[in-house]
Image: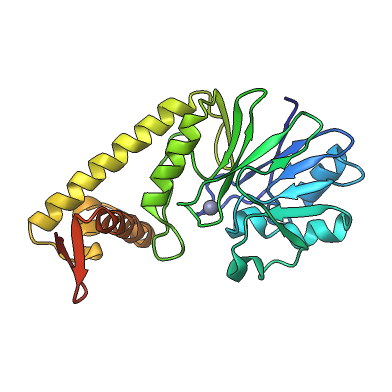
Amino acid sequence: MRVTPLHAGNPGPMTGSGNWTYLIPGPAPVLVDAGVGVAAHLDAIAAEAPEGPAVVVVTHAHSDHIAGAPALVERSPAAQFLKWPWPDRDARYAAPWAPLADGQIIATDEGPLQVIHTPGHAPDHVALWHADTRTVFTSDLLVKGSTVVIPASAGGSLTAYLASLGRVAALDPVRALPAHGPVIDDPLALIASYVRHRQMREVQVLEALADGETTAAGIAARLYPTLEPALVPMAHESVLAHLLKLADDARVVHDGGRWRPA
Ligand SMILES: [Zn+2]
C-alpha cells in the first residue's frame, strides 16, 4: 500500500513529538486524521494532493486529531469528512461530518479500508483495517514504547479499550500505523505487552485496596510515588480507569465516595 505519513507539526506535552496523519494517494486521495491546522501540514497535504483530499477520516475527536478539520474544509470544500459520532465534541469543529459505522468500507485507490470501532481511549475511536496488506491504522490505540492514556472521566473506558485491543489482535495485523511514534512492525507483541501491563496494574490496585486505600488519588500516590506534578492528573485518570473496570467486573464497589473490594 502506498501511504505517505504527514506530520501534523504539533509537538507538545500531551502529544509528545506530535501527530502523524496519513495520506493514501491516487485520483481520490484519503487523509487519515486532520491534525490541528498548522500551515506546514496543510501545505504538505496540498503538495501530495493538489486537488485536496477526497475524503478526510478523523479517528476520534481529541483535538490533536480533529482541530485541523475546519482549515481543511476551507481548503478542500468538496472533501467528505467522516468520523464516528461523538456529538458534544464534534460540534466544536466545524465540518460537514458524516457518520461512520462499524464495518463500513472506505474506498481508496490502494484498496478498501474497513472501519473498526475501537472505543476505550475515546468513545468515538476507530481503527482502519487494510486487509490486502494486513495493515491497521491504529491512531491512539497503540504507541510504541509507551502505554495509552485512558481518560476515565472524559469518555475513556479501560473495559472497552481492552476489548478493542482484542478486536484488533483478532485481525492478525502485521503492521500498525499509529498517530504517535514510529510504525509498529510487531503489533501483536505490543498488544500482548499492553494486556500484561494492565493485568499487573490491576493486581497493584487490588493490593492497595486490600491495604485500606479508598481513593483513586491515594492509590495513584502509592503506584506512582515519583511522578512529576504535571503528570499526577493522568495517573489519577489511569487508576480511576482501573477502578471502573474492576467495578464492571464486580470486583470492587464504590459507595460514599470510597472504593473497596467487593
Ligand atoms: Zn487521543
One can see residue 38 in this view:
no
Seen at 41% across and 43% down, the residue is 163
Seen at 84% across and 46% down, the residue is 54
Q: Is residue 145 above or below residue 257?
A: above
One can see residue 28 in this view:
yes
Q: Is residue 9 above or below residue 75?
A: above
Q: Position of residue 190 (x, y in %)?
A: 42, 30
Image quadrant in which the C terminus is located: bottom left
Q: Position of residue 52 (x, y in %)?
A: 87, 47
**Residue farthest to the right, as pictured:** 51
Seen at 59% across and 71% down, the residue is 88
**Residue farthest to the bottom, as pictured:** 256
Q: Nearer the viewer, residue 173 or 175?
A: 173
Q: Position of residue 86 (x, y in %)?
A: 59, 63
Q: On the picture, is 15 further left or further right than 261?
A: right
Q: On the picture, is 205 further left or further right than 238?
A: left
Q: Nearer the viewer, residue 251 or 95?
A: 251
Image quadrant in which the N terminus is located: top right
Give the quadrant of residue 197: top left
Q: On the picture, is 42 further left or further right than 247?
A: right
Q: Is residue 136 above or below residue 246?
A: above
Q: Position of residue 30 (x, y in %)?
A: 78, 41
Q: On the picture, is 1 further left or further right than 129?
A: right
**Coloration mode:** rainbow
Give the quadrant of residue 106: top right
